[in-house]
Image: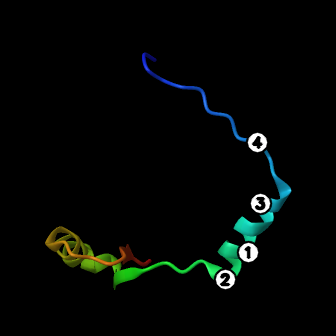
Amino acid sequence: MPGARKSYVQENATDLARLARLVAGELRLRIAGRFPPDGIRAAHERFEAGGLLGKVLVTF
């Protein structure tokens, strides 16, 4: 593809261990709202309203 660059990932045990710690408890996700499957319309409306400090979740 024109303009595409190759990207390589190097394995690094220290960084992988840090990432595992983040996922295990140090990482906190901001959630702006949770909606059940029948609330998808409300979830879209909340998202489109803007001003969110987090993600809009649809939980099954």
Secondary structure beneath dot 3 equals helix
User: Disc 2 vs disc 1: Cβ atoms closer than 8 Å?
Assistant: yes
Secondary structure beneath dot 4 equals loop
The relative height of residue 7 versus residue 50 in the rendered view (above or below) is: above
- In the image, 59 versus 12, the foreground residue is 12
Secondary structure beneath dot 1 equals helix
Percent across and percent down for residue 47 are: 23, 71
Of tags 4 and 2, the one toward the viewer is: 4
Outermost residue toward the top in this view:
2
Could one spot residue 35 in this view of the protein? no
Which residue is denoted by mark 1 in the rendering? Answer: 21
Q: Earlier in the sequence, mark 1 or mark 4?
A: 4
Kindly identify the residue that appears in the image at 70 percent across and 40 percent down.
9
Which residue is denoted by mark 3 in the rendering? Answer: 16
Kindly identify the residue that appears in the image at 40 percent across and 81 percent down.
31
Q: Earlier in the sequence, mark 4 or mark 2?
A: 4
Amino acid type shown at disc 4: Gln
Q: CA distance from mark 4 to mark 2?
A: 25 Å
Amino acid type shown at disc 1: Arg
User: Disc 3 vs disc 2: Cβ atoms closer than 8 Å?
Assistant: no
Could one spot residue 51 in this view of the protein? yes
Kindly identify the residue that appears in the image at 53 percent across and 25 percent down.
5
Dot 2, crowdedness within 10 Å: few (<14), some or many (≥20)? few
Which residue is denoted by mark 2 in the rendering? Answer: 25
